[in-house]
């Protein structure tokens, strides 16, 4: 405690007196394995440095390197302006209107190069809740560091000298596995409430403890998320769900009381035993795919998260006298519309979700040509995976899933045999043999939400769409 205080006053190696002077950590002190740094990242930093600029790896990449994890991507920070960066690389594109950054491409590999941002101006335009709307000046490196969210995300690594510059005690926090926001927590959440979600994501993903000061205001400030543009919330939610720790993240969201404002669906879903089991299974499967490096389809993910809401409304519409298939489409419309206020689901994702949901009653028709037609559906694999989740969660009988597994595996005669076998009476969603195909087709067209978007990302196997800007 006392040594800490002395260090703070004197600004010794462990803690700078002010945050304008970083602690410089040598290779021996930080222990980064240079082999974990991609060659392309080194190409970018060394090109910039040879042209006389400062250039460092920054953010999540440095954090992951310090944790001994191979970073999934590399962000670079420099004092060169976007124009200056662009000139140095053959394939470099300035993107963003508000704050320009440069995408440098080597083949398929994309590196994001950002010019150091300046200190937040006091008079930067804000909304009525204090969220900063525009604040895009370039600045010094220490100013760039102070604008970053967490101490562990505000370190800079120079691959050439193998040194780490630590402005906010990030290294200590890495060692103590602590997530700590830079600056005054309330003010930082207020200026950008997305940070509330980021706390949860990093704490769950890294299995770090949230520092008490950083944690304390979260629950009270949670409603601020409602003022953030839906596309940004979606972007951050997608990162959370595709982090490989989706289940842990959602549990943490609940723990911090963040799920209420954010995902109305989770309020309901996680509180119903069947819904919770279904979501848990879906997220487990997603986490497993992410960890194995397999692609995950956001459509499948959101279809799973929202399914029990659809189910509830589907039943209600049927109880009110609608035919099963149109009732399902009405339920899907309701759920998707209610969701778009909070979370701007991209059209492609919403259309994948609809396809997956709409296929479900079709699995119950196991006679005649229907099953063959379903096999040709673009999203058959996704629909089938979804069906299996429904079986596994206890919503419908396992027998349906087993029948489809057998049908897909079987050859021609085997399939005919399965079709001839009278399906046992099973717990289904009450739509088996629905004979109202013509009517819903009309309704579907009228609502216009059934366009196939091509692409053929069957099953869980499509690559995630780029997050909304
Ligand atoms: P991941 O490994 O999940 O990509 P990351 O830390 O790299 O984690 P990004 O969203 O890629 O997260 O952001 C890169 C860096 O930009 C962060 O490490 C942080 O320094 C900074 N940053 C991103 N979002 C914010 C924010 N809302 N407020 C302040 N700084 C941010
Ligand atoms: Mg990143």
Image (cartoon, grey):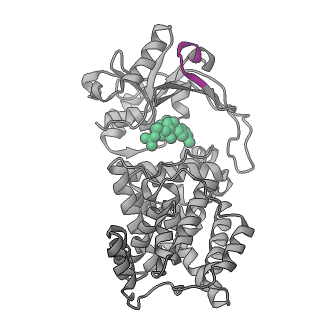
Residue 88 located within the stretch drawn in magenta: yes
39 on left or right of 466: left
**Identity of the residue drawn at 60% across and 25% down:** 93
Which corner quadrant holds the N terminus? top left
**Identity of the residue drawn at 36% across and 40% down:** 173
User: Residue 352 falls in which quadrant of the image?
Assistant: bottom right
Nearer to us in this view, 233 or 319? 319
In the rendered image, is residue 222 in sight?
no
The vertical placement of 257 against 167, above or below, is below
95 on left or right of 210: right
Count of all numbered marks drawn on residues in the image: 0
**Identity of the residue drawn at 56% across and 22% down:** 92
Q: What span is in magenta?
A: 86-93
Residue 396 located within the stretch drawn in magenta: no
Nearer to us in this view, 164 or 383? 383
Where residue 245 sits in the image (x, y, percent)? 38, 55
**Identity of the residue drawn at 33% across and 33% down:** 65
User: Residue 66 falls in which quadrant of the image?
Assistant: top left
Which corner quadrant holds the C terminus? top right
Where residue 382 sits in the image (x, y, percent)? 46, 63
Where residue 38 sits in the image (x, y, percent)? 36, 27
In the rendered image, is residue 339 in sight?
yes
Nearer to us in this view, 175 or 98? 98
259 on left or right of 159: right
Where residue 156 sits in the image (x, y, percent)? 43, 26
């Amino acid at each position: 405690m006392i040594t800490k205080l002395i260090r703070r006053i004197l600004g010794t190696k462990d803690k700078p007196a002010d945050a304008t002077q970083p602690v410089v950590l040598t290779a021996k002190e930080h222990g980064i394995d240079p082999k974990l740094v991609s060659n392309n990242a080194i190409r970018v930093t060394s090109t910039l440095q040879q042209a006389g600029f400062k250039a460092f790896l920054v953010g999540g990449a440095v954090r992951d390197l310090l944790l001994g994890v191979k970073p999934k991507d590399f962000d670079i920070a420099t004092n060169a302006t976007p124009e200056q960066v662009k000139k140095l690389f053959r394939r470099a594109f300035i993107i963003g209107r508000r704050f320009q950054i440069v995408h440098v491409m080597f083949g398929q590999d994309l590196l994001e190069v950002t010019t150091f941002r300046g200190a937040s101006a006091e008079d930067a335009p804000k909304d009525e809740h204090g969220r900063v709307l525009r604040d895009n000046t370039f600045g010094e490196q220490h100013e760039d560091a102070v604008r970053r969210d967490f101490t562990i995300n505000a370190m800079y690594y120079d691959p050439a000298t193998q040194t780490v510059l630590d402005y906010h005690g990030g290294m200590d926090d890495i060692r103590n596995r602590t997530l700590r926001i830079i600056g005054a927590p309330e003010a930082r959440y207020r200026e950008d409430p997305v940070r509330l979600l980021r706390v949860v994501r990093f704490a769950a993903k890294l299995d770090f403890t949230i520092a008490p000061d950083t944690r304390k205001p979260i629950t009270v400030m949670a409603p601020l998320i409602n003022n953030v543009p839906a596309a940004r919330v979606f972007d951050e939610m997608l990162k959370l769900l595709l982090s490989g720790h989706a289940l842990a993240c959602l549990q943490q969201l609940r723990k911090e009381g963040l799920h209420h404002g954010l995902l109305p669906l989770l309020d309901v879903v996680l509180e119903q035993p069947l819904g919770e089991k279904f979501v848990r299974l879906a997220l487990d499967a997603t986490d497993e795919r992410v960890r194995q490096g397999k692609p995950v389809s956001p459509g499948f993910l959101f279809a799973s998260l929202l399914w029990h809401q659809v189910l509830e409304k589907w039943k209600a519409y049927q109880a009110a006298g609608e035919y099963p298939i149109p009732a399902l489409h009405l339920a899907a419309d309701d759920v998707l519309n209610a969701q778009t206020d909070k979370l701007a689901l991209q059209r492609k994702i919403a259309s994948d979700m609809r396809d997956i949901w709409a296929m479900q009653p079709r699995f119950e028709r196991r006679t005649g040509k229907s099953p063959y037609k379903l096999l040709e559906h673009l999203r058959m694999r996704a629909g089938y995976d979804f069906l299996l989740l429904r079986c596994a969660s206890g919503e419908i009988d396992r027998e349906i899933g087993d029948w489809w597994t057998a049908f897909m595996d079987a050859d021609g005669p085997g399939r005919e045999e399965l079709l001839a076998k009278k399906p046992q009476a099973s717990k289904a969603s009450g739509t088996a043999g629905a004979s109202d195909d013509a009517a819903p087709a009309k309704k579907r067209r009228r609502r216009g939400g059934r366009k196939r978007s091509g692409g053929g990302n069957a099953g869980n196997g499509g690559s995630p769409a780029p997050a909304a800007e």
